[in-house]
Amino acid sequence: MSALKKTALTVLAAALLPLLTAAPVLADDADADRSEDKQPKPPAAMSTVGGTLLGKPGTQVNLAAGVPVLPKKLTGRSWIVADAESGDVLASHNAHWRLPPASTLKMLFADTVLPVLPKDRSHKVTTADLAGVGEGSSLVGVKEESTYTVHDLWMGVFLRSGNDAVHVLSEMNGGISKTVADMNKHAAELKALDTHVVSPDGYDEKGQVSSAYDLTLIARSGLQKKDFREYSSTVRVQFPGEEKKAKKGKKAPKRETFEIQNTNRLLTGDAGLDPYKGIAGVKNGNTTNAGSTFTGVAERDGKVLLVTVMNPSGEESLAVYQETARLMDWGFTAAGKVQPIGELVKPGSVGDGSDKEAVGDKESGGKGEAGGDGGTDQASLGDKASASSGSSGMGIAVAITGGALLLLAAAVFLVNRRWPLPDLVKRLPGR
């Protein structure tokens, strides 16, 4: 080969080398861009129920001197931190993004149906009662031709997220269609206008959506009910087993029971996650479309917070609980220091019944900011309650003493635009 040809090949190789070595990196970058494009984006404009800032995409918080920055590890598509008693929204991220709710929708089911069915009423389950339970549903183990009380079934709904129990209670309420209609009507009364119910159990269905804001409204409404609080704070209980028929000439065998435990990991704890101090419910969920969802309520030092997290993308174990715990820690630290960005509105059945959006706009404290940037990554879960083996609830239980308090609470709400939870009582001894 001539010297001229060698020189030409050397020059060509030198020119191509950067392109050849760069090609894999460019492909990776392109894949990353395509992956990013596949991630759903929140709408540019969302509902403004509760305040204008709550309708804006991204993180909204009024950071000012003395206000702690938000934690870094927050990957939920939507979340909200609110004072359960005053209704003040302390911070949010895509609060009104309409997303699949999974079993957190069971909070609306319970808030709607609990007042209708006496807890001591018994029902013998039929084949028709269990028809339509979605494939792969979470089940508590309700059996046909066996009798359960309404109380038993609610334990199955709250602790095991049993879709079988939901369907039986729905049939007792007049059927699935009626129950869905009742739930949608109740959501409208609560001004949970992002919520549309298709299936009462939260199973993935086309068009079934809610939002972090709505789930928090719904939880706040449910917590006004004594039975709702009891069920959502119960750690474990014995559930009735299948009723077996008596053999000819003999008595029926004694009905056995089996233990069920709450699937709320902030209540029970799990590997790498201790129970959260002061936790008192409320409900978790997980489906293919919804990912993990969770609404929790906790009390600490006289403050009661509600936090909802929907569909975190973080790879850490039990991410929805970890992120909820971080937001609760932040909320307890920020309470009394941060200017609210909005409020949890009063239900339409209380007050003038107006269904207007942008109710109670609370922008006076300044514009909302993206609070996640620059935050310290402190989960601060060192102060926790020990795991409980009891069956009547863990953490703080809220108590109510009759209808008079409900009327009083409604009156206070009308005057002060507040809807306080009933008086809190200390946890049971040994909790």
Image (cartoon, helix red, strand yellow):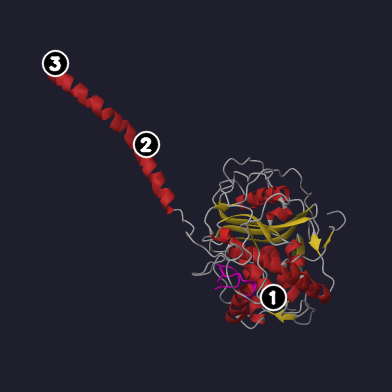
Rendered-image quadrant of the C terminus: bottom right
Question: Residue visible at 25% across and 24% down?
Answer: 14
The kind of residue tagged 2 is Val
Residue corresponding to mark 2: 25
Which quadrant of the figure has residue 93?
bottom right
Residue 408 coordinates in the image, percent (x, y):
80, 73
Query: Image quadrant for the N terminus?
Result: top left
Local crowd at mark 3 within 10 Å, few (<14), some, or many (≥20)? few
- Residue 12 location (% of width, % of height): 20, 26
Q: Could you tell me residue 187's position as x and y percent? A: 62, 73
Residue 287, image x and y in percent?
Answer: 55, 61
Q: Amino acid at mark 1?
A: Gly
Q: CA distance from mark 2 to mark 3?
A: 35 Å
Residue furthest out toward the right = 429
Q: Earlier in the sequence, mark 2 or mark 3?
A: 3
User: Could you tell me which secondary element the residue under label 2 belongs to?
Assistant: helix
First of labels 1, 3 by sequence position = 3
Residue 201 falls inside the magenta stretch: yes
Mark 1 nearby-residue class (10 Å; few <14, some 14–19, many ≥20): some
**Please, what is the three-letter code of the amino acid marked with disc 3?**
Ala
Which quadrant would residue 180 be assigned to in this image? bottom right
> What number of labels is visible?
3
Alpha carbons under labels 1 and 3: distance apart: 94 Å
* Residue annotated with mark 3: 3
Q: Is residue 429 above or below residue 23?
A: below
214 or 283: nearer the eye?
A: 214
Q: Select label 1 or label 3 by which is in front.
A: 1
Query: What residue is shown at x 51% (from left), y 69% (from top)?
Result: 205
* 366, above or below 167, in the image: above
Q: Which mark is residue 351?
A: 1
| Residue 175 as seen in the image, left or right of residue 405 | left
Q: Which residues are magenta?
A: 189-203
